[in-house]
Image (spheres, rainbow, N blue to C red):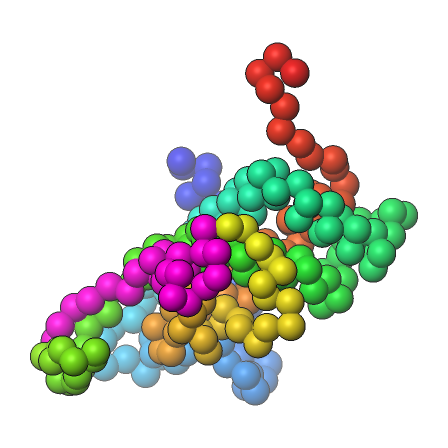
């Protein structure tokens, strides 16, 4: 673990240094979360004292969270493709048509791989990497489904159950990426049928990085290799 911790620590140091140098040269037009935390550290307050160590810890937590959920989604995507060879073949055919066989898939190719995006959505529907999302707390009293929810109530959203609800999805236990073809449903928190990364202010800040990495790795794996399930002695 020590070598890994050292890698994360050096990465966080380098990222902070880059932001400080960029801020010294010119003010960022689109500040990110690191810029916000650096501002908080510079301004300071009696209530919140943000230090360099706090910033490094938050960066490391975000990096680890993004890596873990991405690898979990990747494992489930490959598992479902092995269990559903017809989906595997369709995804491979799309990649060969749009990319060809003379080079590997690049990030710039992902925008044209519609079926690939559908199969990743279907993977997230069936296998949400965080089945209960993060804990939420109501800020004020409200009524939901005929029940009164008092303020300061902590609750969890079961996106695993939503993704398998037969009232929401047809054949909910079947892996069918085709269900998203032509569908407006996305996973960016705009549709409550599928919001594996949360929504609103508590939505996952690493959603786009996670999607890009999963799309790219799945595409390269099924483009470069032939996969199948063989028996123990087969």
Of residues 198 and 182, the one nearer the viewer is: 182
Q: Position of residue 145 (x, y in %)?
A: 21, 78
Q: Please tell me in which quadrant of the rendered image residue 179 appears.
A: bottom right
Q: Position of residue 38 (x, y in %)?
A: 40, 75
Of residues 20 and 209, the one nearer the viewer is: 209
Q: Quadrant of the C terminus?
A: top right
Residue at point 83%, 59% (across, down): 98
Residue 78 in sight in this render: no
Magenta-drawn stretch contains 159: yes
Q: Main secondary structure of the magenta part?
A: loop
Residue 36 in sight in this render: yes
Residue at point 45%, 63% (across, down): 169
Of residues 221 and 183, the one nearer the viewer is: 183
Q: Is residue 58 above or below residue 85?
A: below
| Magenta region, residue range | 151-173
Q: Quadrant of the N terminus?
A: top left
Q: Please tell me in which quadrant of the rendered image residue 221 appears.
A: top right
Report whether 201 appears left or right of 115: left
């Amino acid at each position: 673990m020590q070598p890994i911790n050292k890698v994360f620590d050096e990465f966080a140091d380098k990222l902070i240094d880059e932001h400080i140098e960029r801020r010294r040269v010119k003010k960022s037009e689109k500040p990110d979360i690191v810029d916000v935390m650096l501002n908080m550290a510079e301004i300071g307050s009696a209530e919140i004292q943000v230090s360099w160590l706090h910033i490094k810890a938050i960066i490391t937590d975000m990096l680890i969270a993004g890596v873990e959920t991405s690898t979990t989604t990747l494992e489930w995507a490959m598992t479902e493709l092995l269990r559903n060879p017809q989906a595997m073949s369709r995804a491979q055919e799309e990649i060969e048509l749009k990319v060809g066989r003379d080079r590997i898939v690049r990030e710039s190719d992902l925008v044209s791989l519609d079926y690939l995006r559908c199969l990743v959505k279907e993977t997230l529907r069936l296998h949400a990497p965080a089945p209960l999302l993060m804990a939420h707390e109501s800020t004020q009293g409200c009524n939901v489904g005929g029940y009164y929810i008092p303020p300061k109530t902590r609750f969890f959203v079961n996106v695993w159950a939503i993704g398998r609800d037969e009232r929401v999805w047809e054949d909910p236990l079947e892996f069918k990426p085709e269900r998203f073809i032509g569908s407006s449903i996305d996973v960016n928190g705009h549709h409550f049928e599928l919001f594996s990364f949360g929504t609103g202010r508590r939505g996952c800040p690493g959603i786009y990085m996670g999607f890009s990495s999963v799309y790219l790795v799945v595409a390269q794996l099924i483009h470069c290799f032939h996969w199948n399930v063989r028996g123990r002695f087969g």
